[in-house]
Image: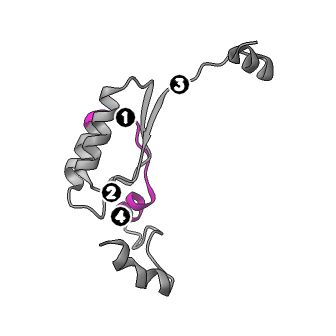
Amino acid sequence: MSDADLVQTAIGRTTMAAKLAIFSDIHANFPAMGEVASHIRDNDYDGVYCLGDLGGYASEPNGTQELVMFMDCPTVLGNYDEGVGFNKGTCGCNYVKPFDINMSPITGS
């Protein structure tokens, strides 16, 4: 019995798998977004989706956003995007425990 037959038997119908490209948390890192876009361009995906968090942290939010807009893929609002876009003061991704606050300069170097 083939894998397809097993799937059909298990769920009672034939399904078709899709090859998806899903990315998120680029955080204004334009060179990284360029690599993601190149990978997507060079491969055959059935769909491309962005799970948000395009801004913050790195130095090129405008270029990053423009590239994602050019890719014309559905994009959802990330927690960072929501925090900035709705002036919430925090995105829920800040360090609050003293140990984490003390360690944050080490992880950023």
Question: Which residue corresponds to mark 2?
Answer: 27
Residue 47 pos. (x, y %): 44, 28
Residue at 42% x, 72% y is 90
Please say if 100 is above or below 61.
Answer: below
**Is residue 75 highlighted in magenta?**
yes
The residue lying at 32 percent from left, 57 percent from top is 27
The residue under label 3 is 18
Q: Which mark is residue 73?
A: 1
- Report how far apart the C-alphas of labels 2 and 4 lie in the structure: 12 Å
Q: Which element type, helix, strand or loop, lies under badge 3?
A: loop
Q: How much space separates mark 3 and mark 1, taking CA atoms?
A: 16 Å
Magenta region: which residues? Answer: 70-85
Give the mark nearer the N terminus: 1 vs 4: 1
Q: Give me the C-alpha separation between circle 1 and circle 4.
A: 22 Å
Is residue 41 rendered to the left or right of residue 75? left
* Left or right: 101, with 35 as reference point: right
> Which comes before the other along the chain, label 2 or label 4?
2
Check whether the beta carbons of the residues at disc 1 and disc 2 lie within 8 A of each other: no
